[in-house]
Image: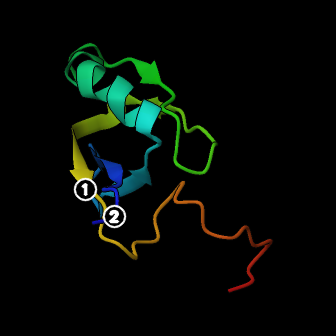
Amino acid sequence: MADSKRALVLHVSTGGEPLVFALSEQGASDLDTKLTDLLAEGKVYAPALADGSTVAVNFAHVATAHLDELPPLARVYGSGQPKRHGFAT
């Protein structure tokens, strides 16, 4: 069976669709222990994403967040999909 991929799912305070970020193994491990404190304290944190980049999250604007498993063919932020420029699809 393939390795499971972890994701950070954010529901921002203003509503709308959740934001989903593919995490690296280290990013998921770090967030596993810090997520509750980050939400409670409303801090800014930059987890490592699966494609090697980072994203700065201001948890003061997050209503709820959780770690989840990514479906096999999911295309989300930081998932390592080929880089495209501009509006190319």
1 and 2 marks in contact (CB < 8 Å): no
Image position, residue 24 (x, y; %): 47, 42
Circle 2 SS class: loop
Relative depth, front residue between 66 and 71: 71
Q: Residues within 10 Å of mark 2 (few under 14, many from 20)?
A: few
In the displayed structure image, the side of residue 13 where residue 87 appears, left or right: right
- Residue visible at 29% across and 69% down? 71
Q: Which mark is residue 69?
A: 1
- Residue visible at 46% across and 71% down? 75
Rendered image quadrant of residue 16: bottom left
Q: At label 1, which amino acid type do we have? A: Glu
Q: Quick one: which residue is furthest to the right in this view?
A: 85
Image position, residue 47 (x, y; %): 48, 32
Image position, residue 11 (x, y; %): 26, 49
Relative depth, front residue between 10 and 28: 28
Q: Residues within 10 Å of mark 1 (few under 14, many from 20)?
A: few
Quarter the N terminus occupies: bottom left
How many angstroms separate mark 1 from mark 2 (CA)? 12 Å
Q: At label 2, which amino acid type do we have? A: Ala
- Residue visible at 31% across and 61% down? 70
In the displayed structure image, the side of residue 73 where residue 9 appears, left or right: left
- Residue visible at 19% across and 22% down? 36
Rendered view: 32 above or below 89: above
Rendered image quadrant of residue 60: top left
Q: Quick one: which residue is furthest to the bottom in this view?
A: 89
Which residue is labeled 2 in the image?
2
Quarter the C terminus occupies: bottom right
Rendered view: 76 above or below 46: below
Circle 1 SS class: strand
Relative depth, front residue between 39 and 25: 25
- Mark 1 or 2, which is nearer the eye? 2
Image position, residue 55 (x, y; %): 55, 39
